[in-house]
Image (cartoon, rainbow, N blue to C red):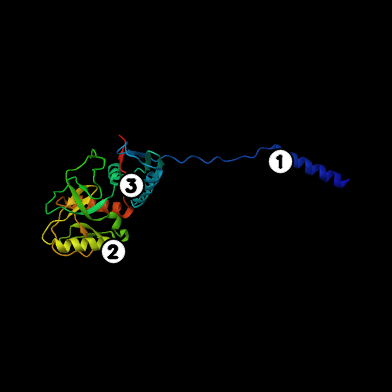
Amino acid sequence: MRRVVLIGLLLVLASCSFSTPLSTQIPAEPTPLPKQLTFILADPTQAIDQTMVDMSCDVFKRRLDRQKHLVFTVNCTPDMIEVGLSANADEQEIASLLTATGSIEFIDPKGEYLEEGTPICTTTYRVLRKTPGFAGESCETIYQTIAKDSQLLRDTVSLTTDQTGRPAVGFVFDGEGARALEVFTAANIGKPMSIVVDQRVLSSPMINGTLPGEGIITFGSSSQAEQEKEAALLLDVLKSGSLPIAWQVQK
């Protein structure tokens, strides 16, 4: 008799457990960050693939991750990158950081002094890529690339100063880049060599001696504060790698 009662009780409990719906908690969607920037292709006609977009996304994340006290999100689609930013973000500075393609070249200016800001084509980039501020066009003169960003040892890129205490970015090239720079500078003492970032001349220093594959990049005659800002931006860009395609902020 006791066994029958127990079995009946178990059946009642079992039926109750199946008939009572379980409560579930639906995770709340994350609160969107207060500032949003949307980046689109600078040249919509450029042929791209998903690998190039994925690489761009990774570079965006690495560059943003280097910004202190910044909370961010990055959402990538085949032709757009959406960036969420915390309230403390300077949107203009972030836009400059993320639209810089990050290409850097040391070039032979053919004995000329190329002024700061001059757009040029090189044996690496024979056409001016369409980027914010550039329409994308061919050049009459193609300058020889001596060494470029892919040959930089990124772990060696660092903030430093020149002999006068001005902000600068130090660098070291790998074996191939170092050798090319050493050979060129040894043969061209007393002549200029131009440093080009994103296809624009950053500076054209005179070669005073053989460079053994390392040196510093300085930032013209702007104010100390502007030089520090430019140095920090270039450091973040070079440390994080160059973008395979150019992006611009959607207006």
In the rendered view of the protein, which quadrant contains the C terminus? Answer: top left
Q: Is residue 172 visible?
A: no
For disc 2, the marked residue is 175
For disc 3, the marked residue is 244
The answer to which of 90 and 194 lies nearer the viewer is 194
Tags 3 and 2 touching, CB below 8 Å = no
Mark 1 vs mark 2: give the one in front.
Answer: 2
Spatial CA distance of label 3 from label 2 is: 23 Å
Quadrant location of residue 86? Answer: top left
Spatial CA distance of label 1 from label 2 is: 71 Å
Q: In terms of sequence position, does the residue under pointer 3 or pointer 2 come before the other?
A: 2
Q: Residues within 10 Å of mark 1 (few under 14, many from 20)?
A: few
Whole-percent x and y of residue 249?
31, 38
Tags 3 and 1 touching, CB below 8 Å = no
Q: In terms of sequence position, does the residue under pointer 1 or pointer 2 come before the other?
A: 1
Residue at 40%, 39% in the rendered image: 78
Q: Is residue 173 left or right of residue 206?
A: right
Q: Residue furthest right?
A: 1
Amino acid bearing label 1: Ser
Amino acid bearing label 3: Pro
The answer to which of 131 and 230 lies nearer the viewer is 131
Q: Is residue 19 visible?
A: yes
In the rendered view of the protein, which quadrant contains the N terminus? Answer: top right
For disc 1, the marked residue is 17
Q: Residue furthest top?
A: 251
Residue at 27%, 61% in the rendered image: 176
Whole-percent x and y of residue 220?
16, 52
Amino acid bearing label 2: Gly
Per the image, label 2 sits on a secondary structure element best described as helix
In the image, residue 106 sits, relative to residue 30, either above or below, namely below
Quadrant location of residue 250? Answer: top left
Per the image, label 1 sits on a secondary structure element best described as helix
